Image (cartoon, rainbow, N blue to C red):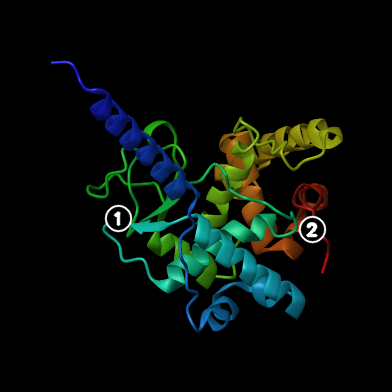
Amino acid sequence: MALSIFQLLTILLLIILVILLAFKMKGEKLVITMPENYKEVLTDYVKFYWQLSEKDKELFEKRVEQFLSAVPVIGVNAEVEDLDRLLIASAAVIPVFSISDWQYINLHEVLLYPGTFNQDFEQNGFDRPVTGMVGTGPMQHKMILTKWQLRQGFVNNSNMHNTAIHEFVHLIDKMDGTMDGVPEIILERKYVKQWKNLMDSTIWQMKTYGSDIDMYGATSPIEFFAVISEYFFEQPETLKANHTELYEMLKRIYKTKDS
């Protein structure tokens, strides 16, 4: 039975309304209310924040709020608390704090797991070595973090590990279209070859002689960039003393200055 002109117009109108609604929803930001004690939380847990000047602290807080308004944090068998949101947002802001107008356009949501998981994202069983991951394939534009490791990365200021920062560095690396340890989106082209050579020589030294750098960084340039970035933001003075050339290159990459 043929549809009447009125029916066709009605269907067409409905399609247009659906399209308009989809675009409206896509463009809407999350409505985020920062917890009343957010400054105290940042001061207590985020060393990078409490070392900033008062003016830069205000900028950091604004960047944290902007991130949380753009990227939802979703618990998967885990309760997402205000502390978790603030720590995730802080980990997102820290590497790009000196890069104005930065947005993680390759991240749509962060999934928070209670503990470690395996490569199939399963949370049960004994073989669960993964503490954080930037998704690919069906998990594209998603990041998975574990609640325990997220908090330990900020609670323990005596080491050079921060899983959340590690995963956000992977996203920065991936922003130029290729995850290869060379963040060409923020590294000036004239330094690309120097950075590649420095990574290769350091990885060789790590494999040959060992290092105070986490040996996981020797598995690939991708992991080296993330691991050495953790070191740079967690223990900058130690990195400067032990690996001056790496420290200076990371300053160029992240546009930072000595305090």
Question: In this image, 208 relative to 75: left or right?
Answer: right
Is label 1 in contact with label 2 (beta carbons under 8 Å)?
no
Q: Which amino acid lies under the numbered mark 2 shown in the image of this protein?
A: Thr
Q: CA distance from mark 1 to mark 2?
A: 35 Å
Please, which residue is most extreme toward the front here? 5
Element type at mark 2: loop
- The residue at which mark 1 appears reads as 76
Which quadrant does the C terminus fall into?
A: bottom right
Q: In the rendered structure, find residue 47 and report the number of the disc placed on it.
A: none
Residue found 57% across the figure and 44% down from its top: 105
The reply to whether residue 117 is visible in this rendering is: yes
Depth check, front residue: 121 or 223: 121
Which quadrant does the N terminus fall into?
A: top left
Please, which residue is most extreme toward the left here? 1
Depth check, front residue: 4 or 242: 4
Q: Which amino acid lies under the numbered mark 1 shown in the image of this protein?
A: Val
Image quadrant in which you'd find residue 194: top right
Image quadrant in which you'd find residue 178: top right
Question: In this image, 25 relative to 194: left or right?
Answer: left
Question: In this image, 213 relative to 110: left or right?
Answer: right
- The residue at which mark 2 appears reads as 256
Q: Position of residue 237 (x, y in %)?
A: 76, 64
Depth check, front residue: 235 or 12: 12
Residue found 59% across the figure and 70% down from its top: 157
- The correct choice, above or below, for 126 with respect to 218 in the image is below
Residue found 79% across the figure and 60% down from its top: 241
Q: Position of residue 31 (x, y in %)?
A: 46, 65
